[in-house]
Each structure stands twice: as C-alpha cells, then as structure tokens.
Image (spheres, helix red, strand yellow):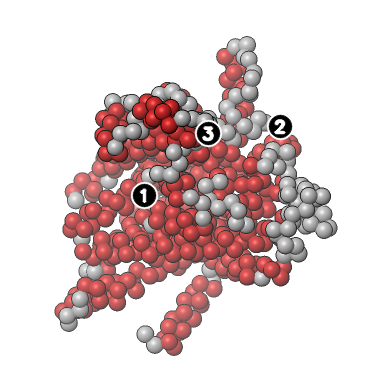
Amino acid sequence: MNFNLKLQELKRFWEIYKSNKLGVIGLCIILFFILLSLLAPYIAPYDPDKTNPMEYLTPPNGKHWLGTNEVGQDLFSLNIYGARISLIVGFLAAGVAITIGVIVGLVSGYFGGWIDEILMRITDFFLVVPALVLMIIVAALLGPSLINVIIVIGVLSWSSTARIVRSMVLSIKEWPFVEAARAVGGGDFYIIFRHILPNTMPVVYANAALAISNAIFSQAALVFLGVGNVSDISWGSILHYAFASGALSIGAWWYFVPPGLFILLLIYGFILIGYSLEEILNPRLRRM
Amino acid sequence: MPGNPIELLFRSPRLTQEQINTLERAFGLDKPLYEQFIIYVVNSLQGNFGISFFYRVPVVNILIPRLINSIILVLPSTLLAIILGIVTGMIAAWKRGGKIDVSILVTAMGLYSLPTFWLGGLLILFSIYYLRLPIAGMTTYGMTYSNFFVYLSDVLMHYILPFITLTLVLYGEFTIIMRNSLIDVLTEDYIRTAKAKGVTTSRLLRMHALPNAMLPMMSIIAINIGLVVAGAVLTETVFSWPGIGRLIYDAILNRDYPILQGAFFVITVSVVIANLIADILYGYLDPRVKHE
C-alpha cells in the first residue's frame, strides 16, 4: 500500500478518535509515562541505586520528594525509573500474546474442521484456568528474569484474542472479496494475510490495549509476590520491598502509595484507549 | 523441575546418602517419573493427593480447611460484586450518555484498573492510621475465646478489609460488561417495536431487555463462580488470609509439589463443573443455542 494513502487513513482515524474525550485522556496518560521513562536519567534527582544508611525510611521532605526506603534510596528517583519495566513488559508481553492469539484465531477460523476443534479446546483451557495462579507457578519454575516474565505473561494470556479473531474470521471469510480472491487463484496463505488479517486489525488494536494493561498488572503482581525479578527497578519491586521489609505495617505510606498509583494510572490509560477504540468500532456503544 | 524437595525439607548438610535414599523411598521419589505419574493419577482419583512435603500431613487434611476459608471470603464478595455490577451497569446503560453513565463508567474502569495488592495495602495503611481493624490472618493470634460469638466477631473483624478489597476489584468488570451488553440489546429493533407498542419502561427493561442482556453475563459469572475455589492469591497474600490462594503461594516458595498438584486438581474440577452448569443453563435461557 502506498505511503500517502496510509497517512490519509491515519489522519481520518485521528479525526474520529480526537472527538472521544476518554480516549484522548488515555493517550495523554500513556505519552506522559513514555516520556517519563525515556527522560528518567534527566528527571531523577538521585542515582536510584545509591543507598544511604544515614537516611532510611524518611518521610517526604524538600530533599527527597517521596521520602526514602529502608536502605536510604531516593523513592522519587526509583519511581521514575520504575516506569521503564512496566512499559517494556506491557508492550512486549502483549505483543507475544496478541501474535499467538491472532495466529490461532486466523488458522482456527479459516480452516475450521478438526484444526478448529483442537485449537479451540486448547483456547478454552487457557480461558478458564486461573491465569495468575498458572503464571505464578510457571514463573517460579522458570526462575526470575525479565525475559521469563515477558514469556510467561505472553504465552498465558492470548486466549481471548484468539476467540475474538476467530469469530471475526468466520464472518469475513464468507464475504465476496474472499471468494473473488480465491477465484483468481489466491492461496490460503495469501488470502489469510492479505485479505482477512487487515480486516480484523481494528478489533485487534482494541484488544491489544487491554492486553497491555493486563500484562502490566500481571508483571507487577508477579514481582510483588517475589516470583518475578525483584532486583530490577520497577513499581512492582518497590511495592514488594515496601511489603516484605515491613515498611507497610509500620505505616510508611510514602513508600507504598506512589508506585501503586502509577501502576493504576498507566493501566487506566490503556483501558481508556481500549474502550474508546471499541466505542469507535462498535457505533452502538457510542455515547450519544 | 528445579528445587529438590528433599534438600528443601531437611536443610541439613550432614544428611548421609543413606538417609537421603530412605527419604526418597518414603516419598516415592526414587521410582521412575512415569511410574510416579501413574501412582499420582490413581491416588488422585481416589481422593488421595499424597503427603505434603512441607507440613508432613496428607494434602487433603490441609486442602479442605483452606478451601472452606477461601470460599467464605471469595464467594460472598463475588456475589456482592455481581449484584452491584448488574444494578449499576443497568443504570448506566439506561441513562446512556448522561452524567450518571459517564461517572459510573469512569469509576468502574478505575476500579477495574486497581492493582489488587495495592488496594489491599492501602486499606492496611488506612487501618493503621484510622480504622484500627486487624490487618492479618483470620483470627487474633494466641487469643482464647470465651464463647462462639466472641470468636465469630473476631473473624468478622478480620474479614472486613479483604472482603472490601475483593469486592471492589471484582465489581468494575461486571459493571462494564453489564452496561455494554444491555446497550447492545437496547439498540435492537424489537426494543423499538416494544416502545412503539407503548410498553412501560419497567416492563420493557424487565421483560424485553434484561433477559437478553443477561446472556453474556452468564458466562462471566460462571467463570468467576468456578474460580471461587482458586481463592484470591493476591488478596489472601496481602492479608495473610489462610485460604487456597495463600496456600498455593506458600507451596511454591516451599517447593511443596503435592500441595500444588492437589490444589490445581480441585480448581480444575470446579472450573469445569461451573462451566458445564453454565452451558446447561444457557440452553434453557437461550433456546437458540439448542437448535444449532
């Protein structure tokens, strides 16, 4: 496809998206956190790894805006650097999940028959099994590392995407242009990727936003429970140490409240975007 | 599988090879894997999940009380969240586009985004500074009770915070799904027809819209009811509630495989049963499904 045409399409989409207030708010939240994580070295006033045994668990003050933790690290700097892992895991793990989900959905819906039967039974299993429990077990078995957490979350959260894509493929493949493509001799591979996939993309994008928010939550939860990598700086690991060191039970709110608030905000941003995309795609949901 | 249970169980470097062999025999770990697996399957089907590596008592003895504790916590909060979600979702859908709808929607999405463990921690902080409610466990440690009612009120005090946490976290999803599915139904042609016939608002909602809007809710409710026995890992961990979720978490840390297998077996069975019931109900609620 020609570049100008794509640009025009994007512009048209932005015109519609712009009018959705919730969606714009969500986009702003996410851009804010992306900027924050890119500019972290310039914004953070202290080296987040630097400990200071003289200042442990100090409440917020002029020098340390969000106070310090139990080893005297500056929490403001830690929280700013923490945005990075959440975004990385969010995008990569959701990428893995969406890729698997789209491929399973396409193959299942297009070919039907026993392939569909087998793939959908596997999908059903992942749909109903308690995902977080399975994630904890697999993550504990694989051992803590960033890449393992990404793989675990990605591989265990593709099922809803597969279901949605499959149901779309079932209707798309009956459309005349698919028949036309087949009539002029298009192969299965060509039809799936050139004609069916592009038509499922809008729904995939809406689903991707939800998948990212789910991945961010799962990563934070795994790290909080101590089965992720707690030595990387992330919001989840700050919460983990705040809880495990007992700082929470002695009431160190400045240690525990900010990282969770950031996780909440970032997830909220993606959910707002996902919902707005859904509203745009499904005119029935539009608020009149 | 990483982590040898024998090493974790007896953290003694002085264990002789002979003693290790005896222990491995006692737990059946010396047999080849496929044989261990067959023994496991046969025993599970008879309700025998083996002996916990960590607690050293039969898994069933630990599983059942934990299961009850989880159900006590998770079932009521799930039901409350479902009811609240249906009611507010209905209101939002009916007042679609208005201020009420937007505020319900925005709140529900906010609660849906809440990291469970963080909300739990917030309530703990709040309790430390203001509420003075117990923040860990199910009963006060080392307390003796003069009668059953004192015991019950102590449990109730411990119940409040995890109950609020779970209900709030579950509520958002139900509201959003209820709202969207009701809006979907309300834009159908037969609703317009009913309105044109002069059906009253309450009758329109009750007889025409709700039954159809409840269909997508049914499968979500079934999945959640099935998951009740899986407990709530995050909430139970934060509040040290002695349920299945906390048990699974501890079992992973202790490499207690028999407990993990037993817990997963129970979870799987109940999820399958809940979904089966939902499928059967679906046939009654939506006759179209039967014709396929």
First along the sequence among labels 2 and 3:
3
Looking at the rendered structure, the kind of residue marked 3 is Pro
Q: Are marks 2 and 3 on the same chain?
A: yes
From this viewpoint, is residue A208 visible?
no
Q: Report the Cα–Cα distance between label 1 and label 2.
A: 40 Å
Q: Residue A92: x percent and y percent?
A: 47, 64
Chain of the residue displaying label 2: B
| Residue at image location 38% in from the left, 36% down from the top | B261
The answer to whether the residues at label 2 and label 3 have Cβ atoms under 8 Å apart is: no
Q: Residue B13: which disc?
A: 3
| Picture quadrant where residue A30 is located | bottom right
Q: Residues within 10 Å of mark 3 (few under 14, many from 20)?
A: few
| Picture quadrant where residue A19 is located | bottom right
Depicted B89 relative to depicted A47: above or below? above
Would residue B47 appear left or right of B253 to someone viewing this image? left
Query: Label 1 belongs to which residue?
Result: A127
Would residue B111 appear left or right of B211 to someone viewing this image? right
Chain of the residue displaying label 1: A
